[in-house]
Image (cartoon, rainbow, N blue to C red):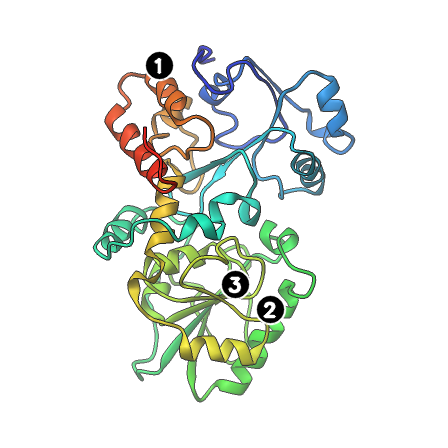
Amino acid sequence: MARKIQSSPFANERALFVQRNLFTDASPVHALFSHTQYLRPTDLASIKLETVKNAGFDRIVFGNPYSALDAKALYRQARDSGFPRLIIERGALPGTVFLDEDGFLADSDTYQSNAITSGPDDASSLEELQTRYLGRPALEPQKNGPVNLSSSGAFKVLFALQDSSDTAVQFQRTPSADYPAFLRTVEAFISAHSSQFEFYFKPHPREPDTRIAGAQSLARTDIINALRTCDAVVTFSSGVGILAMVLGKPVCFFGNAFYQNAPGAFPFDGTAQLKAQLTTTPQEKAKSLPFLNHLAASYSDCSFFGRRAAAPSSRDVMCRFTNVKLVHGGKRWQQSINEIWPSVAARSVRRTLENRLSLTGRSL
């Protein structure tokens, strides 16, 4: 167990961990609190926020609060009442971890419009982002077969499909825009516009046998190669949209995508609007740069993280926390890192915090 970190912003808090993942299990994360305790999985269905308060806990730590109905219910209680919480889960950029005291996915202020349009937009940084993130393993295991697309020169549309039981699909949909409605819209659009576009689809690795009439499957193609060779991406709410933006591709989304406020992401609710988006969407590669740079400054870098093939040591976890999202006292968090392991590059931490603060007009 890592020693307690007296300068942690959570040093005086008792935390209840209700979910376990690669990051919530890391002992340095537990060392941020004065006391931690795991909730037994069998108790999650019956736990109420009032019970947590009465037991003397100051904060609830979640992994993905939308991964189960019971976790979602407790998360909603905490969020609605303002009870302190911390979400620790993998980030949308490959090899990153997401830490937030506010919310998860579209709930988080990380993705709100007042934050994501103020990052740097230097076009030269697009190549840097591609180098940093696109060479890392995808979040799901990928086939690496050849990309067999026609050379007709027609506008190529890639439909990035999702696992029908995926968290975002199940819990982040809107009342009028669920995943079956998305699939029906896609099929209707292909049927009506097969002469104007070329259609391809990438099934989710957990549902490789999915078929869409009128579109060619790229099931055996790595997602990055598929994105590189298409002109635009259409999805329900997949995080693949972020990778498409890194490659300078416009993204059209149907559901409650967490990146819905980003420049370079365009909503549609039917075939007519999808056609309008695909035929009028700006193609400038730098369109999404402020948003992508904002994410790069908001996520913590965990370059070991790929397919969960082997869990790293907890020391490795904390040593990778060099791009810390400034959500709770940046100076104190920087001191916490330096206090645990002096080998962590203090200058890198400071530079990251300065970048994060500059987005809101503040400085260290």
The Cα–Cα distance between marks 3 and 1, rounded to whole angstroms, is 44 Å
The answer to whether residue 207 is above or below residue 131 is below
**Is 224 above or below relative to 360?**
below
Viewer-proximal residue among 22 and 11: 11
Give the farthest residue toward the bottom. Answer: 195
Q: Badge 2, how many Cα within 10 Å: few under 14, some, many 20+?
A: many
Disc nearer the start of the sequence (2/3) = 3
Q: Nearer the viewer, residue 260 or 232?
A: 260
Residue under the point 50% across and 37% down: 89
- Asked whether residue 303 is in view, the answer is no
Residue 35 in picture, x, y percent from top left: 58, 13
The numbered disc on residue 3 is none
Query: Residue flagged by tag 3: what amino acid is it?
Result: Leu
Q: Which mark is residue 182?
A: 2
The residue carrying mark 3 is 161
Three-letter code, disc 2 = Phe
- Give the structural element (helix, strand or loop) at label 1: helix
Classify residue 103 as left or right of residue 246: right
CA gap, disc 2 and disc 1: 49 Å
Q: Which residue is mark 1?
A: 339
Q: CA distance from mark 2 to mark 3?
A: 10 Å
Going from N to C along the chain, the mark reached first, 3 or 1, is 3
Q: Is residue 92 left or right of residue 147?
A: right
| Residue 297 in view, yes or no | yes
